[in-house]
Image: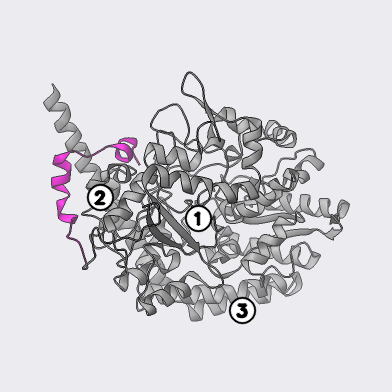
Amino acid sequence: MKTKLKYFLATAALLSLLAGCSSGKGGDTKESGDQAKDASGNKNYTAFIAVPGTEVPDDSRLNEAFAKEFGWKVKVSWLTGQTAKERIGVMISGGDYPDVVDASEGRSAMIDAGAYVPLEDYLDDYPNLKGMLSDIDWEKIKKDNDGHIYTIPQFSAEKVKDMETEYGGEAFWIQKRVLAWANYPEITTLDEYFDLINSFLAANPETDGQKNIGFEILSDDWRYFCLENPPQFLAGYPNDGAAVVDPETKVAKVYDKLPEAKEYYQALSAQFEKGVIDPETFTAKYDQYIAKVSSGRVVGLIDQGWDFQSAEDSLVSQGKDELTYVPFDLVLDKNVTPQYGEHKSLTTQGGIGVTVDCKDVKGALQMFDDMVSEKGMILRNWGEKDVDYQIDGDGKFSRTDEQWKNWRNTDYVNKNSTAFGYMPGYGGMLPDGINTVSPAQQPEEFKKTLVDSDKAILEAYGVDNWNQMIKKQDPVQPWFPIYTERGKWTSKDEAAIANQNMQDVKMQWLPKVIMGGPDAFEKNWQDYMDTYESRINYKAFEDALTDEVARRIKVEAELQEVVDKTESTKESSSK
């Protein structure tokens, strides 16, 4: 994607050309009704995020600071004991919604139920919120949602440049202590990775009196992507999620039938028989998985970094940094270039929205606008001046060692922070052009977060931070990520039926193929493929994604043409 397309702010001429995508407000929602207030006069909002998370006290220090600065509070609740679709289904059945909701896998059901307020006609009044994305990006969201903006993507915006120091995407992870023990070996292939784990386990069978676990594969509910999607990465494709797309032919194909898929699961079968893979890995619930990783005895795992961040935070809080993890972008063939890392990309089928039960839609949007204002971004990320950070004479933010010690302590974090991780926001640089959005992304501050063992690893691998351990996709294609298309399918669509059958077959057969052992692998794999062929209309699945690839390429070209014409007109008029 051209840089100017990503950052160009469209003029009135562009907006008039795109006006055909616009539409009116839906529903009989109240724009500024009687929102509940506390004794101090602060508006009180409720939010539900359909993923597990950590509750933060309503009176935490930074929650109180936001109330003082902006005049509102928001009670954030998280998913517990149900899947996202189950919890959202209960909400829809009862017709009772919090003020704002990120429905995760239940988003399409919320839209079908008319539970979200369309926001496209409100955004102009909230410049901070609208300014997170370009006008082009907002138009893309509308084009992908029948002319509406039901939800605001929280993780698609980046200001100025990528400043990430941590890696939150998918990788094969291994504990830092293992790298130090082995004198920081080069790890490029899956074979090298498992050879290292086996060697370490032979020499170090226990941690704190408990048996070490060589490898975990989270397989709980929608998180079974840890089980089923590694073949796309091992084959050198980026995380399109639903399929791989040939960059030359623009045709989508399931990655389950790639040669790399069979080779990968055959390797896992061998490791399972050796006892390297946790025998409970396919039945463990997410909280059980997090508990095992938090114990420090899991040597390696396949996951996305954000998905087990709470376990890493717990280990750091215990002073066990050497038991946290380093990512590796493995391949099966050293001649393949990996593309695990993702650049910021627009999500048109996800995000957080305002529900029809919110009495003050404008107030809720003002809350979002406040959160992404310069003051809001500083307060939620850096904290309070002279309590959580200082400012020098040049305007540079910094933290003392004591302040960093506080923010490495999970008890301190829970008592003092906010729960805004799934609220609208952006990465990169603050508007001052001096400081990063996140304290740990400020190069000088990142170094303060490192213990000696971290510094040794980074030096050994010749990188400045953990994010640089992973190669990024190149280039970012206009269809990326294609998996978002699945969110638009209805239960009656052939592609949706194929998708559900695909999930069912993989959840049934992949554990069986892995646990069956090397001797039975060929038969089990053939039985799996036979079931795959007979139960899944994967051609309908592939065709639907291929059609969507073509549509996104066309939309990208049309919008780029509008931008180019508008820019040309501006240049001509300025001469």
In the image, the segment drawn in magenta is 1-26
Q: Position of residue 355 (x, y in %)?
A: 33, 64
Q: Which residue corresponds to mark 3? A: 527
**Lower sequence index among marks 1 and 2:** 1
Relative height, residue 269 to residue 4 (above, below): below
Q: Position of residue 93 (x, y in %)?
A: 38, 79
Q: Which mark is drawn over residue 533?
A: none
Label 1 – label 2 distance at C-alpha:
28 Å
Near mark 2 (Cα within 10 A), the count class, few <14, some 14-19 or many ≥20, is some
Q: Between 248 and 504, which is closer to the camera in this rendering?
A: 504
The C terminus sits in image quarter: top left
Instruction: Provide the secondary structure element on which disc 2 rests.
Output: helix
Label 2 – label 3 distance at C-alpha:
53 Å
Near mark 1 (Cα within 10 A), the count class, few <14, some 14-19 or many ≥20, is some
Outermost residue on the top side: it is 393
| Residue at x-position 30% and y-position 48% | 137
Q: Which residue corresponds to mark 1? A: 58
| Residue at x-position 24% and y-position 58% | 32
Q: Is residue 236 magenta?
A: no
Q: Between 77 and 500, which is closer to the camera in this rendering?
A: 77
Q: Which mark is drawn over residue 123?
A: 2
Q: Position of residue 292 (x, y in %)?
A: 72, 61
| Residue at x-position 60% and y-position 47% | 413
Q: Position of residue 356 (x, y in %)?
A: 29, 67
* Quarter holding residue 110: bottom left
Relative height, residue 230 to residue 511 (above, below): above
Residue 57 in view = yes
Amino acid type, callout 3: Asp
